[in-house]
Image (tube, grey):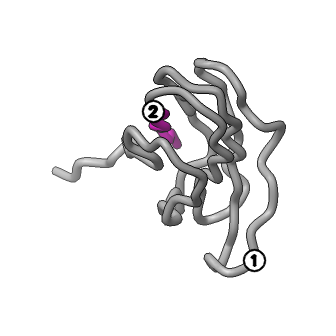
Amino acid sequence: MSIETTHLVGTLVDAVSATGTSDGQSVADFKYGSVQVSGTFVASVQLQTSNDETNWVTLGAAITVKSIVQKDFYGQYIRAVVTWTSGTSVTVTFIAKR
């Protein structure tokens, strides 16, 4: 019997309160998923995708409010770029699905 993983759960940014870029997270073999942005913040979160973790491209519009958005994952990796203004913190999590 084989067990196939149908989804992947991860955290891109965990309770940060500064401008910065997360490490890339592999979403290889996963085609789409949802990204949740939570916390108390005034900031923008720009999702990016890459096939090589060197050349990153924008994945949709920046997220500026608490939300859950569905995204197609075109590259092998995703990451979050946070541009911080104020507040307590922002967290970005994701669930990738086949």
Relative side of 73 to 34, left or right:
right
Outermost residue on the front side: it is 86
* Circle 1 residue: 55
Identified by mark 1, the residue type is Asn
Residue at x-position 50% and y-position 20%: 40
Figure label count: 2
* Circle 2 residue: 89
Identified by mark 2, the residue type is Ser
Instruction: Please tell me how crowded label 1 is: few (under 14), some (14-19), or many (20+) other residues with Cα within 10 Å.
Output: few
- Looking at the picture, tell me which residue is in the foreground, 77 or 5: 77
Label 2 vs label 1, nearer the camera = 2
Residues at discs 2 and 1 in contact (Cβ within 8 Å): no
Residue at x-position 73% and y-position 55%: 74
Secondary structure at numbered mark 2: strand
Q: Position of residue 15 (x, y in %)?
A: 39, 38
Residue at x-position 52% and y-position 59%: 22
Q: Quadrant of residue 35?
A: top right
Q: Is residue 60 magenta?
A: no
Mark 2–mark 1 distance (CA, rounded to whole Å): 28 Å
Q: Quadrant of residue 93?
A: top left
Q: Which residues are magenta?
A: 90-98
* Image vertical order of residue 75 relative to residue 2, above or below: below
Secondary structure at numbered mark 1: loop
- Choose the circle earlier in sequence order: 2 or 1: 1
Q: Position of residue 9 (x, y in %)?
A: 37, 41
Q: Is residue 92 magenta?
A: yes
